[in-house]
Amino acid sequence: MPIFRRLPRIRRSSARPLGRRAPTALLAAAVIVVIPLGSAGVRATAGTVAHASGSAIEGQHSGVTSTGIAAAAPREAGLGSRAPELTTADAEAWLDGLLPSMLQREGIAGAVISVVSHGEVVTQQGYGSSEAGTSTTEPRPVDADTTLFRIGSVSKLVTATAVMQLVDQGRVDLDEPVQNYVDIEVPNRFDRPITLRHLLSHTAGLEDEIGGLITSDANGRPTLREALASEPPEQIFEPGTTPAYSNYSNGLAAYVVERVTGQDFEAYATENILEPAGMATATYAQPLSAEQQKNMSRGYDFRGSEEVPFEVVTPSPAGAISATATDMSRFMLAQLGHSPVLSPAMLELMHEPALGADTLGGLAEGPRMTLGFFERDRNGHRILSHAGDLTAFHAQLEIFPDDDAGIFISLNSTGVNGDATTAIRDAVTTGFADRYFPDTRPAPAPIDTAAAHAETLAGTYEFSRRGESTFIRLFFILSSAEVVPQPDGSLTVSAIVDAAGQPLTFVEVEPWVWQERDGQRRIAADVVGGEVRAISFDPAFTLQPMSGDRAAVPLIAAFTLVVLAIALVSWPVGAGIRRFARLPSTSRAFVRRLRLAVHVALLALVAAVPLWMMVAEALLTDSGSPGPVVIRGAQVLTAIAALGVVPSAWLVVETMRSREPRRASWWLLLAGRVIVTLAFLGLGFLCLVGGILQPSLSY
C-alpha cells in the first residue's frame, strides 16, 4: 500500500501516496520513523501526505505530498492580452504540441485528457500506450473513448455529489450530527459534533489513517461499514477549525448515503450519478470484470517497467473509480449544470466555500474547500479542482464554473522523476487557464506590515494531516516545515518550492495574507493576539506551530544515531584489541554485568532494525501489512533498547565511585559513558515524543 507520497516538498499541495519508486529522501525518512535513530538531514521540509498525499489517493496535487509544492507558472498573457478562442482545433493543436514531448521526456507510458466548454466536449484525446508491447505484439494505444484509467481521489467528488442529492431531497442536513445517520461510533472528543459539512470539507478533525488504504488483493475486501467501524481514527482537532485531508471522512460521508438510502453506496452512485450523467463505462469494480479488463490501461512505474498490479482502494468511495476520458467529460458537464444529476441550487451550494471565518478564523482568507472541491483562483477566474493519485495512476480534474469550462487529465505511470506527474499536470492545467482565461489584473503591492508579520510567522511547523495516536507519529514529526523571514520583509515556506526545489518567496498583500512573488499562489495565517494558530497553504492542508520537544526530534535523532552506532562498533573492536594484546580485565563482576546489559540493549536495537524496515516496506509499497507480530516485535525490541539507559547510567555512577587514578584515560572513559547514557536518553525521548511504542497496532 503506497502510503506516503512526499509529505516533504509536496508539489502543488497533494501529499500523495508514495508509489513503488519512492524518492530517496522519503525512504530515508520512513526508515528513521521505524528505526528510532534518525538524522537531522532527513527532516522533511514539507508535509504530503505527504505525504500521502497525503496518504494514498490524495485529493489535491496542486499537492500535500504529504513530499514542495510546485509554483503555478507565471502569467503567460499580459494585461489586456487577447486569449485564443477555446475551439477543438486550437485545443488539440495546443495539447499535441505540449503533451507528447512531456510524456516522452518524463517516461510516462500513456495519458488521457478531455476538455469541455459551454455544454459541449471540446476534445478528448488519448496519448501513448495503455499496454506495453511484447516481442510478438504491438503496444496498445490509448483510446479516449474506451480506455479505462484510474482516477484516484477524484472519485471523492462522486461521494460529495451523492450527499448533495440527498440534501436536495431533504433526506439529510449538512449541519446535522453525522452520528444521527449511522450505526457506528463516530469519533467525537469535542462538544461540537462532526457533520456532513465537515466531512466534505476535510475539517472533521480526524488524524490520518493509512494502513490498508491501498492493496493489490481484492480477496476479503471489507464492506464499507467494516472498513469504517474497525479502529476508526482519533479526533485531534475541533470540527470545522482545521483543514486536514482525510480519506476516512469521505468514506464516512458515503456510509451516510448508504444508510439513508438503504442501498450499497457503489450501487447508489452508479444508478443515480454515473448512469444519469452518461458515464456508461465508469465503474467502482475492484477487481474489474473480464470484459472491463480488456479496456483497462495497465499501470507502470515508468514506461518500460513491469506492470503495477491493479490497486484495490478501501474505502472504495474515496478512490476506486475507473473511467474513460469520455466518462470524465460527462462528469464535468454534470458539475457545470448540463445534466440532471444535481439541481442548479445544489450545484451552487456545492461549489461555495463550505466554511467561513466564524470557525476557520484567518484561514478563511486563504484557499478553502467547497463541499467536495478544492477552490482556488487563477488569473482572477475561480477554479474548482480535485486530484487523485494511486501508485501508477495520477489524475486531475478542474472546472471553471463561472466560465462554463473544464479539463481532466490522467496518467498511467509515475515517470522516471519523482515529480513527473505533478509537473505534467501543472503544465496542462495552468497552461489551460493561462491560455484561455488570461489575467487582466495588476499584481498586488506589498503592505507596510510585511516585515513584522513575517517575523511573527517565523518558526517550525507541522502538518495538520498527520497521525498522532500510533507509531507513525514520528514520521510526521520529521516531516516538518520552516517559515523563514527574508531581509526584504518577504518570507519563504520550505514546503512550497518551485520546479527546481527552491522555496518560493511570498509577499504580504493583505493583513496576514501572502501571495507568491511573480505568481498567484496565496497563503493565509490565523493569528490571534500575536499568536500564530495555523497557516493555510492549500484548501485541505494546514501548517501548525510545532512544539519545542517535537522540533528538537531531528537533532536528538541524529545525536542518538551517531553515538549508539559508535558504541555498537566500539564494543567488538575494543574486545578484539584487548584479546589481541592479551590485556587482563580489571573490572569488577558487577561492572562487567552492567556492560553486558548495555550491549544487550544495543543488540536489541540492531534486531529491531529489520523489523522496522519491514514496516517501512509495507508503508511504502504494495506489499501489504507486516502483521501485528512484526510491529509488536519491533516495539518490544525498541523498548528493550531504550531501557539500556539504566545500566548505562549505572556505569557512569560506578565509574565516578571507582578509586582509579583521575588520569586522562579515566576522564575519557567517564565522558564516553556519559555520552552513551545521553544517547539512550535520546532514544527514550524519541520513543516518547515520536509515539513509536504506542499500543495501537493500526496505522
Image (spheres, rainbow, N blue to C red):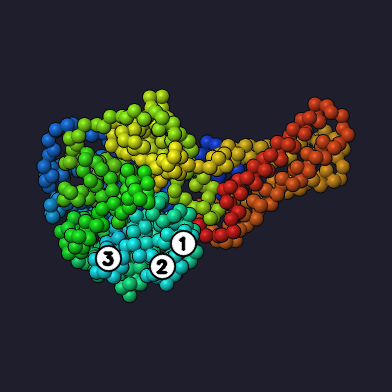
Q: What separation in Å lies between label 3 and label 1 (alpha carbons)?
A: 23 Å
Q: Residue at x 86, y 40 (%)?
A: 587
Give the residue type that dot 3 points to: Val
Q: Residue at x 16, y 41 (%)?
A: 436
- Image position, residue 695 (x, y; %): 59, 59
Residue 658 falls left or right of residue 45: right
- The secondary structure type at the circle numbered 1 is loop
Marks 3 and 2: CB-CB under 8 Å? no
Q: What separation in Å lies between label 2 and label 1 (alpha carbons)?
A: 9 Å
Residue 457 falls left or right of residue 145: right
- Image position, residue 465 (x, y; %): 44, 50
Q: Name the image quarter holding residue 521.
A: top left
Q: Residue at x 37, y 46 (%)?
A: 361
Residue matched to label 1: 188
Q: Earlier in the sequence, mark 3 or mark 2?
A: 3
Give the residue type that dot 1 points to: Asn
Sort mark 2 into few (<14), some (14-19) or many (20+) by Cα contacts within 10 Å. some
Residue 433 falls left or right of residue 52: left
Residue matched to label 3: 167
Give the residue type that dot 2 points to: Gln
Q: Name the image quarter holding residue 430.
A: top left
Marks 2 and 1: CB-CB under 8 Å? yes
Q: What separation in Å lies between label 3 and label 2 (alpha carbons)?
A: 16 Å
Q: Earlier in the sequence, mark 3 or mark 1?
A: 3
Residue matched to label 2: 179
Q: Observer-nearest residue: 255 or 636?
A: 255
Q: Is residue 462 visible?
A: yes
Sort mark 1 into few (<14), some (14-19) or many (20+) by Cα contacts within 10 Å. some
